Image (spheres, rainbow, N blue to C red):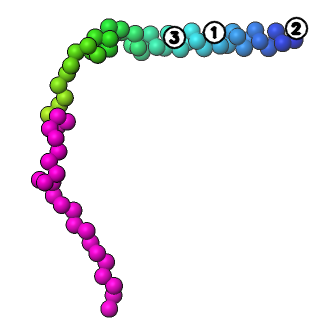
Amino acid sequence: MPALYIMIPVALVLVALAIYVFFWAVDSGQYDDLDGPAHSILFDEQAPDHQSAPRNLTTEPKRLQHEEKPDA
């Protein structure tokens, strides 16, 4: 019986927290577009130009490696 004195308020706090999180998600627009992500997976989109072009390693500038010379 004493456990009910703890479990009932804890359950009420958890229910209140769940209701708060649900209303926060609805107000912040989490459920505005339910069909968009489902349809976007069906259609191929072209990648932007900077991602679709392969990197040409011969035209990139070479990095110089500096060797340390011992002091004479």
**Residue type at tag 1:** Val
- Nearer the N terminus, badge 3 or badge 1? 1
Give the crowd class for mark 2: few <14, some 14-19, many >=20 residues within 10 Å.
few
The boundaries of the magenta stretch are: 50-72
Characterize the magenta stretch by its predominant secondary structure. Answer: loop
Residue extending farthest bottom: 72
Q: Considering depth in this image, is 24 or 45 the residue closer to the camera? A: 45
Q: Which residue is mark 3?
A: 22
**Residue ranking furthest to the left:** 59
User: Would you name the residue on which mark 1 appears?
Assistant: 15
Splitting the image into 4 quarters, where does residue 17 fall?
Answer: top right
Give the amino acid type for the residue marked by disc 2 in the picture: Met
Q: Which mark is residue 1?
A: 2
Q: In the rendered structure, which disc, 3 or 2, sits on the residue that comes first in sequence? A: 2
Residue 54 painted magenta: yes
Q: Is residue 63 above or below residue 52?
A: below
